[in-house]
Image (cartoon, rainbow, N blue to C red):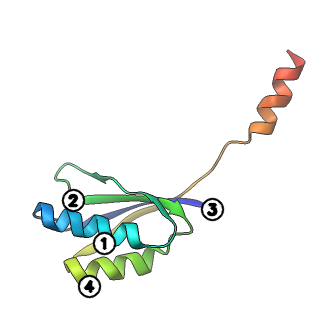
Amino acid sequence: MQQKMVLKVQMNCEKCQTQALRIAAAAQGVTHMPIQGKEKDELMVTGDEVDSVKLTRCLRKKLHHATILTIEEIKEEKKEEKKDDEKYT
């Protein structure tokens, strides 16, 4: 099950950004983690079965402020249905 979650993390300097990325990369199941947002204070984490609570706790231990903004499941489109449609045309 692919998940995409957005975490708001207080990152004032590049050292904090690097530390947040290292913590996210060490979490089990994480595949992609760009920093986004207007003030570069949001961390979007994508991966398989990522434990959002555990990741947030680790970020809070090191960076002191981290909150979960959104968690959503990424649904993959079924490719089999598309193949069946192509056979009839």
In space, the residues marked 3 and 1 are separated at their CA atoms by 22 Å
Compared to 48, does 35 lie above or below? above
Residue 67 circle label: 1
Q: Earlier in the sequence, mark 4 or mark 1?
A: 4
Which secondary structure, mark 1? strand
The residue type indicated by label 3 comes to: Met
Where does label 4 land, which residue?
61
* Dot 1 crowding, Cα within 10 Å, few <14, some 14–19, many 20+: some
- Disc 3 vs disc 1: which is toward the camera? 3
**In contact (CB < 8 Å): disc 2 and disc 1:** no
Residue sitting at x 33%, y 53%:
34
Left/right of residue 74 with respect to residue 82 in the rendered view: left
* Dot 2 crowding, Cα within 10 Å, few <14, some 14–19, many 20+: some
**In contact (CB < 8 Å): disc 4 and disc 2:** no
Q: Earlier in the sequence, mark 2 or mark 1?
A: 2
Residue sitting at x 42%, y 81%:
54
Residue 70, position in %: x, y? Answer: 41, 62
Q: Quadrant of the C terminus?
A: top right
Where does label 2 land, which residue?
41
Which secondary structure, mark 4? helix
- Disc 4 vs disc 2: which is toward the camera? 4
Q: Earlier in the sequence, mark 3 or mark 2?
A: 3
